[in-house]
Image (spheres, rainbow, N blue to C red):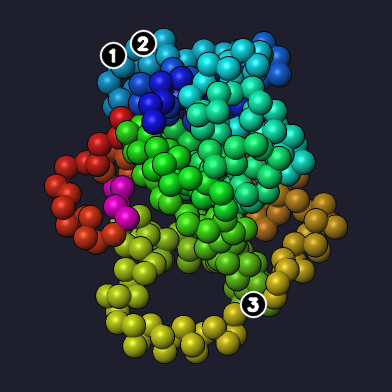
Amino acid sequence: MKIENAVVIGTGMMGPGIAATLALGGVASTIASRTEAGAQQGLEQAWRQLSQLAEHQLIHATDVTRVRMLLRATSSLETAAAEADLVIESAPENMEFKQALFAKLDKLTRPDAILTSNTSGLSITAIASRCQHPERVVTTHFWNPPHLMPLVEVVRGDKSSDEVVEAVRALLAHCGKVPVVVKKDRPGQLGNRMQMALVREAVNIVQEGIADARDVDVAAKLGFGLRLPVYGVLEHQDLVGLELGRQICGYVAADLNNDPKAPALFDKKIAAGETGATAGQGFHEWPAGLATEVRARRDRFLIDCLRRGVVASASPAQRKEETKEAVPLW
């Protein structure tokens, strides 16, 4: 399935970076927004992200001009979608909105065009339920920030075709990403299922007074989190041995939070107005400017990992075949 023209719907945190990624892979990409001004802002954001990649030698400076020529902006979704081989939706996480949008895209696009959603957890089967051709619909969940994070989750809907899943996986790999295929359409997909289990237990630890929020985050960042980029969760189990792994898991699991709902501490903090960084207080205090500083620190770390080639393959067998050189991105 040849993918030469793409449309990315949305100009928030994700859309511009997704469009820039596709353009880096040689795909002419149009950023679509409801207004010309919004579309232009999204385009300029994609340009800035390309400049950031070049500034840190993640792409050649000479590539920026070439890639920028593959990026466009429009407020006419109808016109852009009619010519697209691929449409990626990156709009607000609202099921009714997405269902209506995909039903519209199903009619606007050619029958062989691929339709994907950047949803981080909604069911792609449900999103495609109003489409006449649900076999061409899958999830492409990019992680934030999308121009830096290597992972993209390709989630199969109940009716997604093998051909479409493979075409999307191959395209993302060609664009420098590390795609994983999620075989079942379940809440939270793959990465967020694991992340939400961690969030629930982290909040529960604070709620029960086992440790405070600062030490919880220090333990995550400087303990198991520090080795995760090159040493996966299940690799660790294999290396310590499944007998020991089962013993520890069985002992600790009995004391973990397994409530089928969010811990009550969320509600308590929200009721007190402690809703996070924008409010100045959440699990941590957030004085003015600190959120921007933390995001910048995150991006510097990601850039350093990419420059050093700290991008692990999906399995030990694949890593065995790699050279010691940096994993090529773009």
Instruction: Write down the residue under mark 3.
Output: 257
Q: Report, in whole angstroms, how far the alpha carbon at label 1 lies from the one at label 3.
A: 52 Å
Q: Residue at label 2?
A: 65
| Separation of residues labelled 2 and 3 (CA atoms) | 52 Å
Q: Are marks 1 and 2 in contact (CB under 8 Å)?
A: yes
Confirm whether the magenta stretch covers residue 312. yes
Q: Quadrant of the N terminus?
A: top left
Answer with the quarter of the image where residue 206 lies. Answer: bottom right
Query: Which three-letter amino acid code belongs to the residue tagged 3?
Result: Asn
Q: What is the secondary structure assignment of the residue under circle 2? A: helix
Q: Position of residue 291 (x, y in %)?
A: 60, 41
In the structure shown, which secondary structural element does the residue marked by tag 3 occupy?
Answer: loop
The image position of residue 91, as x and y in percent, is: 66, 33
Which mark sits nearer the N-terminus, 1 or 3? 1
Name the residue carrying label 1: 62
User: Which is more toward the observer, 132 or 51?
Assistant: 132
Q: Which residues are magenta?
A: 310-314
Picture residue at 34% right of the left edge, 75% below the top: 237
For mark 1, give the secondary structure: helix
